[in-house]
Image (tube, coloured by chain):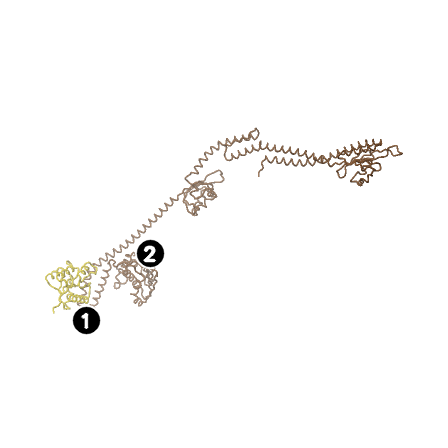
Amino acid sequence: MKNQNILIVDDEESIRLSLQFQLSEQGFDVDTAQSGEEAIEILDKGSSYDLIITDLRMGGESGVDVFKKAREINANIPVLIITGFGGDSPLFKEAIELRPCAHAFKPFSKEELLEKVRFCLEGAN
Amino acid sequence: MTMPLRLTIPLILLLFICALATWSLHINGKMAEENVEKESKERLTRILTRLQGSVEQALRRNNLEWAQEEIVGLGNDPNIELGILVDENGKVLASTEIIQIGFMLQDIFPLVTRKESFVPGTLIKKAKSSLAANVLRGLDGKSLFGIVPIQLGSTEGFIRPTRLGMLFAKLNIVDLKATARETVRHQVIQFSLFLGLLTVGLGLFLHYHLTQRIQQLVLAAKAFGRGDFQTHINVGGDDEITILAKSMMEMAEKRMGVEEKLGLSEERFRTIFEEAPLGVALIDSLTGQIYEVNPKFAAISGRTREEMASIDWMSITHPDDVQIDLDNMADLNAKKIDGFNMDKRYIKPDGSPVWINMTIAPVTVIDKDKPRHLCMIKDITDRKQAEEELEKYRNHLEELVEERTQKLKNSQKQLIHSEKLSSLGKLTGAIAHEFNNPLQGLRNIIEILSNSAPSEKEVKLAELGKSECDRMARMIVSLRDFHKPSSGKSSPININRCLEEVLALQIKSLKERGIQINQQFSDKLPLVEAVEGQIKQVLLNIFQNAADSISGGGQITLTTEAQDSRIIIKIQDTGSGISEDNKKNLFEPFFTTKGTEHGTGLGLSISYGIIQNHGGDIEVESELDRGTTFTVILPIRG
């Protein structure tokens, strides 16, 4: 059976790499993008993912732009929002409007991450 | 009662006449009776003497009948009651009563021997020796008795006529006396009547000639007294009264000239006094007695002029103004000042005060020994009211300014605090996000590394690293929440219940720490318009601080009460207290005495912000080692 693939979008290298490590360890195929632009470019190329995990505020295109792009390509694709801001930031509220499968406030534990990832993937199926 | 002279004098005269008449009647009556008696005696003597001659002549001629006729002739006189001729033996020879002739005298008059009834023997003896007629008044005074010896002839043997008879006569004088008295009475009455008429005439004369004229003088004098000098005196005649009347008229004319001038002057000043637009009064300097007031004065003081004239000024002056007025009066009487002016109050009869401006100055009126004050007053009640209004308005304005200033100060204070919190919040919010990202990376890395830790020790260290990351994350959350604008809606909440709920969360740990809780909640605490979550957060924060200040057991007392339009919540502990230095920084953000492990230093600062946002306040009283009292004040209407 083919592994489920996940795209992680975050401008923080430490987060990108550590998340990639933790999810790969769980048997997921993980790609990363270090900015919104890169993520949109990847999606434009036609790569398809079972789950997109994206930060919200990044230099340049935001997580919301990535979210919208992903939904353009696949209206049912689950998106997990991770953010360092609280629930009252405008970007977060905009993102919630797009109905992500889940969200996690940084910093979160490995357990929280895995639980929410599984929830998103199960919901999609 | 006065008795006019024109009546008095005639009355006295009449009385005098009456007395004179009575006296005259008495004296003259007696005299008339005596005269009658005397005349009767003489008359009887004459009759008897005449009879002696005629009877003796008849007897000498032995004509007894003639003698008898002579005797009977006596009876013609109505007053002669009896006439008897007896001989030398007492035998009746002739009598006015015929039947007695021949009888013995003793038989006819058994009483003849009785001295009081008839002729005494001495009279007979006297008559015999003198041979002449003798008359004597009877002892009862009603009759006269006369006796005369009559020579009857000679006894036989004697040449000389020795036979001597007696002629007796009795004359009744009662009627004569009565007639005489009556005559006198008539004379006296006539005389009295004449005098009476004379008196009446005198009275009329006095009335018309003197009294009436004097009466006119009296009336004129009275008229002059009233100031009516026009009165004309018409007494007529040319005597002393006329002169007096003329003098009075002259005096009146002179007086009239002066009076006229005085009258004009008086009228002028009277008009000024009566019509003056100011209240004017004349007051006794020493007693304060009011003598006279003008109509304006009476009107201002709310009394009639007559009422005013019977009281002193102290009794109508407001009690608070009497002393200062008395002091001024004392200075004036001591001549320290020439006069004074002051504002004071009179009390009207209905008790309402009237403000007046009063000027007092001494005046000399009529009597220099009785010093008076001239008092002039003006009603200034309207002005005083306006001043009071103005004063009230000014005070109100000051209050308003004060109030507004206080509000502005509070707003400014609140604004500064909010601004401080807000800018701090923005900063921390920004930092928080920046911290969260690396923290996430850090935490993930520690977690990954801990999976490949070579020993238990490294695993523990990695766990510590993770928990430190979590603590940092919590700090970031609280920093981020700190600046959040108040969220949540206001609703009526029960502060007692809020405190109980906060207490319920803590009760277990409090018991473990040996802290006793006293609740003194008011039963009548009204609901407060507030955000429940925020108020609970504040109460919890203060309560935790109180608990943390207590080590080794103690007490926390919770008190609630309503005061006017706010409620007071007191949280009092018996803990370590707060030093003066710390008290200054108590509400500053990031100020903490608990050490960085236990506190962020934001609790009280946030609490202060919340309560200020609710329009309330937090006050702190503290004494080192004794304890601290936090007082939260909340307005009842949000």
Quadrant in which the N terminus of chain B is drawn:
top right
User: Which of these two is toward me, B140 or A56?
Assistant: B140
Q: Colour of chain B?
A: brown
User: Mark 1 is on which residue type?
Assistant: Ser
Near mark 2 (Cα within 10 A), the count class, few <14, some 14-19 or many ≥20, is few
Give the structural element (helix, strand or loop) at label 2: loop
Can you see residue B285? no
Give x and y (percent) for residue B343: 41, 44
Q: Residue at x 14, y 68 (%)?
A: A27
Q: Is residue A90 left or right of residue B89?
A: left
Q: On the image, numbered disc 2 is attached to which residue?
A: B565
Q: On the image, numbered disc 1 is attached to which residue?
A: B455
Quadrant in which the C terminus of chain B is drawn:
bottom left
Give x and y (percent) for residue B424: 23, 57
Q: Is residue B168 left or right of residue B597?
A: right
Q: Residue at x 25, y 61 (%)?
A: B600
Give x and y (percent) for residue B478: 24, 61
Near mark 1 (Cα within 10 A), the count class, few <14, some 14-19 or many ≥20, is few
Q: Is residue B89 above or below residue B427?
A: above
Circle 1 or circle 2, nearest the eye: 2
Asked where in the image residue A58 lies, by quadrant, the reply is bottom left
| Total labels drawn | 2
